[in-house]
Image (cartoon, coloured by chain):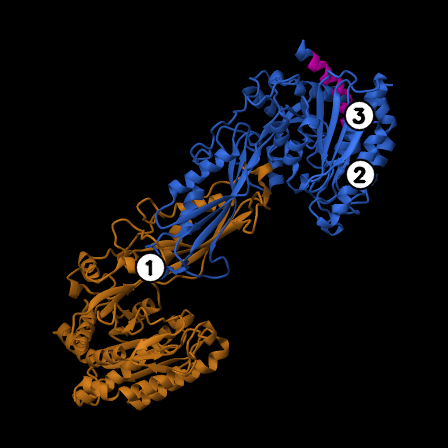
Chain colours: A orange, B blue
Amino acid sequence: MDARTYIERHRGEFVAALKDWLSIPSVSADPLRAGDVRRSAEWLVAHLTEAGFPTAEVWETAGAPAVFAEWPAEDPAAPSVLVYGHHDVQPADLADGWHTDPFVPVEQGDRLVGRGASDDKGQVLFHALGLRALLAASGAAAPPVTVKLLVEGEEESGSPHFPDLLRRNRDRLACDAVVVSDTTMWAADTPSMCVGMRGMTDCQVDVYGPATDLHSGSFGGAVPNPARGLADLLSGLHGADGRVAVPGFYDGVAEVTPQEREMIARLPFDEAAWLRTAGSTAASGEAGYSTLERVWVRPTAEINGMWSGHTGAGSKTIVPRSAHAKVSFRLVPGQDPLHVQERFRAYVADRLPAGLRVEVEFAGPGVRACASDISSIVGGPPSAADPGGPFGGGAAVRAARAAMQRAFGTEVLFTREGGSGPEADLADILAAPLVFLAVGLNDDRIHAPNEKVEIPLLLKGAESAAHLWTELAAHAAGARS
Amino acid sequence: MDARTYIERHRGEFVAALKDWLSIPSVSADPLRAGDVRRSAEWLVAHLTEAGFPTAEVWETAGAPAVFAEWPAEDPAAPSVLVYGHHDVQPADLADGWHTDPFVPVEQGDRLVGRGASDDKGQVLFHALGLRALLAASGAAAPPVTVKLLVEGEEESGSPHFPDLLRRNRDRLACDAVVVSDTTMWAADTPSMCVGMRGMTDCQVDVYGPATDLHSGSFGGAVPNPARGLADLLSGLHGADGRVAVPGFYDGVAEVTPQEREMIARLPFDEAAWLRTAGSTAASGEAGYSTLERVWVRPTAEINGMWSGHTGAGSKTIVPRSAHAKVSFRLVPGQDPLHVQERFRAYVADRLPAGLRVEVEFAGPGVRACASDISSIVGGPPSAADPGGPFGGGAAVRAARAAMQRAFGTEVLFTREGGSGPEADLADILAAPLVFLAVGLNDDRIHAPNEKVEIPLLLKGAESAAHLWTELAAHAAGARS
């Protein structure tokens, strides 16, 4: 029985298990749900044990528990691959606009509706099914590479204890590649792989001027106005070409290769539809880049909020005593968040006029961007950050793409994501190349009411996962030969 | 008996009357005090009648009542002069930090403490004493010019019905000069006359972008950010030289004359002390002008407030859907508020990028600046707005200055005020030159707890007022000869 047949025969069993798991409201952001997050971890340990994983255990953190599982290859010299996902979910309440109870999952035709169906329980679970399918098809007792799973419980809360978890368990997590199953494809009929996520660092800027709000009749025009100082700082963030004008901001930026730009351009992107989704009447941004390039492969500076002085009804003609802004930077591979922070602080200090004082407070060290090395596919230079090993030089992506293409029967294109996740920590701390294998869709309404997943796509995900281990073994062998 | 002796002998009676008036809490901003504002008007009518004014009456408005009084000259060909003041007061409450009940006036040495003592009841009342002193000294039955008083009851509420009052009663208010007694002198030992007040117009700017707040990971850098659009607009308000960069903003501006700049420079201005009062660590503003010039004779643009997107704790990485600011412009003589409004709208429209929409809403038609014509004193060209007549060409200022110099026995310098009042309406609607005669001090704590007035200065005000009518008659005769 081939993998696909195995998977189709086990569809009912798979969906029933997923519904069972989805009925546990593992909302990591809600302290009252801590017990549910633990139940969710225990459920997964039981499920993976039942699926045959020789090791499956709950891992404690200073916050919510994670799950670790391992199925070693028979050949002790075989490479190891770590699958990353998360078992916690976004908050959800019927009152938010759900048509059904978010934690009573329901099938609607080929769709399964419930919080976590797509993000990320469905995509974690297809790995167990995929591995079972591979073993059923091959008749082997173990996968051709050692398969490890790390499923954290705090992703929807910013993964505050994840780097610590990785560092403490570096030995048991040691791997030659990391497979991330927590993203989306371009469309149901356009299978694709994410090959990079932007990083981020964000701060609050506080500009202080006079000791109190001043009457603008008596003082206006003769003392520095913090709101004007802040407007100057914010306006100066960008040049006329849309580039970020903070000196040194682009230091280290890995320019996207012409080959990847060509891959991006092949995606059937409907800018008008995208603008309708954005609710914006015009696209704009860095000169020389398309809209998709602007949100995927280019770093940005964005004003997320600002406030100063009188913000109520009517007039209050003051020189305000202070002005404030929230500013965030999206980063691309090669950019060091701490360097960006230092450059922004210098920019602010250089620009502020006498009589104003400024404080810049970053929310934390920031998140590095991460990217798969796709050089072996698009023919560009290898990623500077490529850690090498059996899956270096883009071999992991080549293998995963081959696996997805076998499952979907069509070419798999490349996308990126504009947002940030804990993936860079995986690549950095475990020193392994990243590859993204996921089947979510942008219209799955993750983080919104009525989250759903397309069951046929989850099954394609399982089939991709079934092929993944043999493809990886083959590509690793190729890499070592 | 000369005027000074008369005034000194009537000090006790004057202070007792003022205390009586100050005990009426004529707070125009408080609807519950409407009856008190009316009692205050009636009190003044009785007082002026008792002082000998042949006409003294309450004038109704759509809001709080004003008081009108008239004492005609014997010579029907004599010029008429209108004194402007107000009988309403700022709100005051013991809990605000008053050491004594704001409406139970108390003498503390030479000071009288109570709401309205300086602003403006004390300064209205000295006119009655001054006129009595003049008649006692001259033995005449009437002043040498027709004296009219208009004492409004809504100045502390923005004088909403004042222009209408002026227009409806233009005939009875007809005059050849307007004496405003509602300002301050430079210092007790540096008597001075205000010779101008800035005008003002203010607005709210609303910039709209995407239909909703957008996730900056998914959309940031590819759609126009309203906060950035607003920052660009606000930053562009000024050039590097501190000048307002709105094209056409300076149209019509009456440049201050070198002679008046020299008069301003003669004031003993302590910039370090001024900065301490402002609570600012540096002065700044339009290049080529001193601090006093910046707040008195130069027009400005000021950001009074702004808000956009996320303004709470922590991070929210969004492209905000809108951004807002409060912007006000201080105006100088020659500037038309409506023209400034039109120029600012054009500036905003010209600068806004595609994808953003903006609305600019001005609070009203704005307030014109006003200025006395001091050309006859400083030797500059006459004011372009000078309506001429017996007191045109600076004659009113020359007469009032001579009157003050006789009372104070020293040179009277010139100041201006950076704020706005209803004075421009008086000059415009009555088509008469303005002159400011007042003895308040900047440390009288008007609009603040523990407002006080220096009784000796009120008596100097009365003496100045006593001389004013003869000086005006003399200068008018000179003008007609």
Q: Quadrant of the C terminus of chain A?
A: bottom left
Q: Nearer the viewer, mark 3 or mark 2?
A: 2
In 3D space, how far apart are the residues under numbered discs 3 and 1 (Cα atoms)? 74 Å
Element type where label 3 sits in the image: helix
The residue to which callout 1 is attached is A276
**Which of the 4 quarters of the picture holds residue A67?**
bottom left
Q: Chain of mark 1?
A: A
Q: Nearer the viewer, mark 2 or mark 1?
A: 2
Q: Is mark 3 in CB contact (under 8 Å) with mark 1?
A: no
Q: Quadrant of the N terminus of chain A?
A: bottom left
Q: Which mark is residue B372?
A: none
Residue B408 shows up from this direction: no
Q: Which mark is residue B130?
A: 3
Element type where label 2 sits in the image: helix
Of label 3 and label 2, which has the lower sequence position?
Answer: 2
Q: Chain of mark 2?
A: B
Q: Residue B289: image x %, image y %?
A: 52, 29
The residue to which callout 2 is attached is B42
Residue A309 placement, left or right of B473: left
User: Magenta residues, as a range?
Assistant: B461-477
Q: Residue A68: image x %, image y %?
A: 34, 81
Q: Is mark 2 in CB contact (under 8 Å) with mark 1?
A: no
**Which of the 4 quarters of the picture holds residue B71?**
top right
State the residue lying farthest toward the left.
Answer: A481
Position of residue A271 relative to residue B84, above or below, is below
Amino acid type shown at disc 1: Arg
Residue A419 placement, left or right of A207: left
Q: Chain of mark 3?
A: B
